[in-house]
């Protein structure tokens, strides 16, 4: 098993550009989520999904879109990048549909810089 | 609402013990503990569920006081490999199940020889 994979590992964007961060898991997990990590702030939930076709907002959803057309993939779209979106982005997955009864497996992260 | 972790940072010598605390103002369904080394992804340590169930590694211990909405992670006989930032994540007990983990700001643990 590859676990949770994320691409790209690093990305530099100009303000106003759009892009998609990719996340995939091969563990047949129901629950997938996206977090952003900023220095001194911990991990903050952006969006999550409890199964294919079902998504919902987390703490900091503004400026991001998600969709979940398959169990394996959960891409995160930045609509119009802003410097405030400079961060490290982690995708995570969990066996349970609730996401909070089982451990979450984190991907290696994408380091995004918006200039 | 973010849980509060304490201390923010701690330095230990190898073999010493440490306790990291996590508290919330809301009724909790579960508490997760993760460790993150610099430049790496968070790694699961333990889950404590409402009702007393625990899942995690044999060498890590933790407690969950449901009435006080508090959890503590106990690190005994610390090793150099224990160094990293420890995060607690809490899931609120909404009655209908909860789908969001809210993480604290982390506790930076440094173990020195």
Image (cartoon, rainbow, N blue to C red):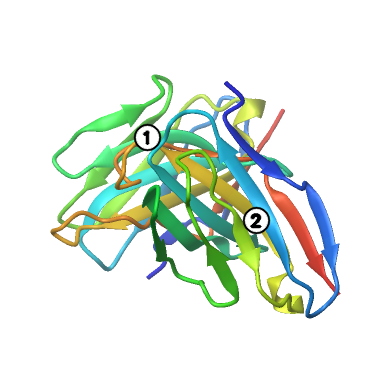
Towards the viewer: A56 or B101: A56
Towards the viewer: A103 or A32: A32
Disc on the earlier residue, 1 or 2? 2
Secondary structure category for the residue under label 1: loop
At a point 26% along the width and 56% down the height, the residue shown is: B98
Quarter of the image with the C terminus of chain B is: top right
Residue B103 in sight in this render: no
Query: Tag 1: Cα neighbours inside 10 Å, few (<14), some, or many (≥20)?
Result: some
User: From the viewer's perspective, is residue A61 above or below residue B79?
Assistant: below
At a point 79% along the width and 74% down the height, the residue shown is: A17
Judging from the image, mark 2 belongs to the subunit labelled A
User: From the viewer's perspective, is residue B39 above or below residue B96?
Assistant: above
Q: In which quarter of the image is residue A113?
A: bottom right
- The label on residue A95 is 1
- The label on residue A42 is none
C-beta proximity under 8 Å, tags 1 and 2 = no
Left or right of B55 in this view: A87: right
Which residue is denoted by mark 2 in the rendering? A89
Q: Where is residue B22 in the image (x, y as percent from the top left)?
A: 38, 54
Judging from the image, mark 1 belongs to the subunit labelled A
Q: Quadrant of residue A29?
A: top left
At a point 43% along the width and 21% down the height, the residue shown is: B59
Quarter of the image with the N terminus of chain B is: bottom left
Measured in 3D between alpha carbons, the distance from the residue under mark 1 to the one under mark 2, in whole angstroms, is 21 Å
Q: Where is residue B5 in the image (x, y as percent from the top left)?
A: 45, 58
Are discs 1 and 2 located on one and the same chain?
Answer: yes
User: From the viewer's perspective, is residue B4 above or below residue B91?
Assistant: below
Residue B57 in sight in this render: yes
Q: In which quarter of the image is residue B37?
A: top right
Q: Where is residue B34 in the image (x, y as percent from the top left)?
A: 49, 41
């Amino acid at each position: 098993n590859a676990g949770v994979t994320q691409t790209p590992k690093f990305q530099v964007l100009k303000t106003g550009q759009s892009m998609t961060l990719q996340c995939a898991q091969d563990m047949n997990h129901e629950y997938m989520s996206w977090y952003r990590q900023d220095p001194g702030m911990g991990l903050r939930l952006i969006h999550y999904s409890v199964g294919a076709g079902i998504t919902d907002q987390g703490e900091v959803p503004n400026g991001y879109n998600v969709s979940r057309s398959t169990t394996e993939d959960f891409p995160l779209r930045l609509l119009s990048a802003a410097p405030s979106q400079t961060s490290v982005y982690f995708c995570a997955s969990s066996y349970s549909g609730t996401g909070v009864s089982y451990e979450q497996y984190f991907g290696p992260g994408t380091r995004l810089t918006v200039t | 609402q973010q849980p509060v972790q304490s201390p923010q940072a701690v330095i230990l010598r190898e073999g010493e013990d440490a306790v990291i605390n996590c508290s919330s103002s809301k009724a909790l369904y579960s508490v997760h503990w993760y460790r993150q080394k610099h430049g790496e992804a968070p790694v699961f340590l333990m889950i404590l569920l409402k009702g007393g169930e625990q899942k995690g590694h044999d060498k890590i211990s933790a407690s969950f006081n449901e009435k006080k909405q508090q959890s503590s992670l106990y690190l005994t006989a610390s090793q150099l490999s224990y160094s990293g930032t420890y995060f607690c994540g809490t899931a609120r007990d909404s009655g209908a199940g909860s789908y969001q983990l809210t993480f604290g700001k982390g506790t930076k643990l440094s173990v020195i020889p």
